[in-house]
Image (spheres, coloured by chain):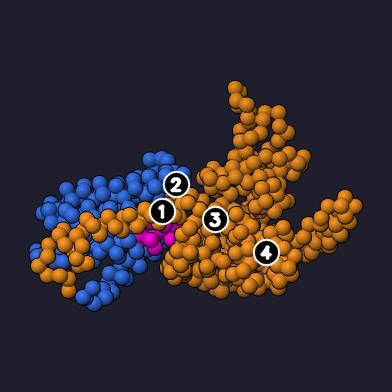
Amino acid sequence: MGAPGKSGDGVGRGGLPLGVRFLLLALLSCTLMVLDHRDRYASELRQALSLAVYPIQLVVDAPFSAWQWATESLADRRALLEENEQLKRDQLHASARLQRLAALEVENARLRELLESTARLTDRMLVAEILSVDLDPYRQRFNLNRGAADGAYVGQALLDASGVVGQLVRVGALTSEAVLITDADHAVPVAINRNGLRTIAVGTGDSGRLRLPYLTHSADVEVGDLLVSSGLGGVFPAGYPVGHVVEVRARPGQSFAEVIAEPAAALDRDREVLLVWTADDEDEPAATTRTDGEPDGESETEQNLAEAR
Amino acid sequence: MGRGIDFGQIFALIAVLALAVVPLPDSIAPYRPAWAAVVLIYWSLASPRRAGFIATFLTGLALDALSGTLIGQHALALLIVVYVTRKLYLRLRAFPVSQLALFVAMLLAVYQFVLFWMDGVAGRAVSGLETWAPVLGGTLLWIAMWSLLDRGRREAPARL
């Protein structure tokens, strides 16, 4: 048992007085915070820590995954058949549109050749699952079950079936932390699809709203306009839907209008998202090794991290 | 260390880490108590040898990794809370529960303030009165813990 006969606020086990031990560890904490804040000298430590707490995240996530699995495997035959029908119909529609897309892609490549600009390569994607782990309730952040081992890198864009979701802000060995486009600290460069007008969509902290604070009263924007990622800034690949404008309000006396958009992606309902490797993230050799879907982890990740900085 | 591994302590700390990130309904999520701080305050009063500084520090680091804050942020806040409690624990144990609860609420407010302050220094401050809601949740949790778990302990002599 503990050291008998010594009082609690006197000398502790280690022989050092309580205050000294406290000061040493408090100083260590402060040093770590400064290192972590000043451009991530502590990134190895963070990687090791995130690996250490990964089992906890898995345990917390397990009941939610199990529930999902159970509802899926206990669904009745009729529901499954209906879903199957629906998916077949969707698939037919999608493949019909894809046929046209193939022709358009060839045409686009040809036209770009005429303009002597480089052809856009297709993006590579990987499905990542969102861990049911709550972070700070005032930040729109979440954890994913993909990390550096899968080739993920800081600044990588995330999509879902209907639009842009967010980007990675921290990458651990097996997990990573992502920020949603609606986080109050996040902004996406967008373009209005109807007329190509470029602006920036800023998060509000509410997962159903984006703000477009830099549009003047005379800007050509209407309710219902589709916002797509413009590709400026180099984080999000161009041309993916970001949201729809739901409100345009002129504010007399202010130089900018108040424009509110609704995100296209199902930000608060997603269980799975797609990690995207855009064409210009990867060099030619890297692109060839990656097409098999099994990137070899470390060297490429380091390269990607270097590029992201 | 001169003593065996305290599995109860390790298990409780892991449970505390899991509870800190388990998803809650949106309506009560803001009131999520700072589980780690509450449990460590409880131990500092009831069985101080469990609330060691190294254990506190490591719990804090794990919390930082889990919740994506600066490394050392939760660690520092927990260390401060545990230090103050352990410094005063013999006097505090003589207090009636109501005064003790008030003291714990104050400590939890300090804890929240340190986290909040560090967020501000790092330029990621979140403002609003809701930031203080965990103090309320934590105090209620602590009262529940103290009245449920401490029955048998109160008469026992101070242990180390």
Horizontal and vertical percent for residue B12?
Answer: 30, 67
Distance between mark 1 and mark 2 Cα atoms: 9 Å
Q: Which residue is drawn at 16% across and 66% down?
A: B160
Of marks 3 and 4, the one in the foreground: 3
Element carrying mark 1:
helix
Is disc 1 on the same chain as disc 3?
A: yes
Residue type at the position of mark 3 = Val
In the rendered structure, find residue B122 and report the number of the disc placed on it. Answer: 2
**Residue on which disc 1 sits:** A33
Judged left or right of residue A155, residue A280 is: right
* Start-end of magenta stretch: B59-74
In which quadrant is the N terminus of chain A drawn?
bottom left
Residue type at the position of mark 2 = Ala
Local packing at callout 1 (Cα closer than 10 Å; few below 14, some 14-19, many 20+) is many
- Is residue A307 visible to the viewer in this orientation of the structure? yes
In which quadrant is the C terminus of chain A drawn?
bottom right
**Residue on which disc 4 sits:** A125
For mark 3, name the chain: A
Residue type at the position of mark 1 = Met
Question: How many numbered discs, if any?
Answer: 4
Q: The blue chain is which one?
A: B
Sequence order check: which comes first, mark 1 or mark 4?
1
Q: Which chain is orange?
A: A
Of marks 1 and 4, the one in the foreground: 1
Element carrying mark 4:
strand
Sequence order check: which comes first, mark 3 or mark 4?
4
Distance between mark 1 and mark 4 Cα atoms: 34 Å
Residue type at the position of mark 4 = Met
Is disc 2 on the same chain as disc 1?
A: no
